[in-house]
Amino acid sequence: MGEPNSDPIDAIANQWRRERPDLDLEAMGILGRLGRLMVRGEQLINAVFAEHGLQRGEFDVLAALRRSGDPYELNPSVLADTLMLSRAGMTGRLDRLESAGLVRRVADAGDRRAIRVALTEPGRDLVDKVVTAHTENETAMLSVLSPADRRDLDRIGRILLGSWESRL
């Protein structure tokens, strides 16, 4: 790996340079690092949820309900759409969260045939505690960057995301 600040992505790029010196490998290096950042970032983020007895998807449900505002209730279909999740996947998460006493299914006041998912008081207390730990963790993860670097990273991320999403 040789040079200062080199990483496993450099080793891969150096192997390709040796075998295929005709290739432009700049994008491979950048995207390879972004991929590793996502994997490592997910590990660091998921560790916080696990400390509180939650999986990422369960936190996402609790957080969506909490963000929805008082009375912290949503239709299961709206919740699934918000989280880009299948109805079956949502049912499994809701079953686990309901068994843990963190959410409850209640009849929709406007349509007795429909149900809504409501955040319970223990669910609200837990999500408030976890979101605090989560945001502190994310802040710590980026603390090696200066404020200007964080702004630049955010700006570049927005540009790339907008471009890539328009291609799909």
Image (cartoon, rainbow, N blue to C red):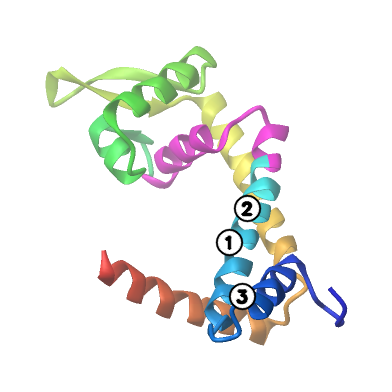
The residue where tag 1 is placed is: 35
Identity of the residue drawn at 31% across and 24% down: 88
The secondary element bearing badge 3 is classed as helix
The secondary element bearing badge 1 is classed as helix
| Residue 60 within the segment the image draws in magenta | yes
Residue 60 in view in this figure: yes
Q: Are marks 3 and 2 in contact (CB under 8 Å)?
A: no
Single out the mark in the foreground, 3 or 2. Answer: 3
Describe residue 14's horizontal placement relative to residue 84 as left or right.
right
Q: CA distance from mark 1 to mark 3?
A: 10 Å
Identity of the residue drawn at 64% across and 60% down: 36
Q: Amino acid at mark 2?
A: Val
The residue where tag 2 is placed is: 39
The residue where tag 3 is placed is: 29
Quadrant where the image shows the N terminus: bottom right
Describe residue 161's horizontal placement relative to residue 142 as left or right.
left
Q: Amino acid at mark 3?
A: Gly
Which contiguous range is marked in magenta?
A: 47-68
Identity of the residue drawn at 35% across and 71% down: 164
Residues 120 and 31: in front is 31
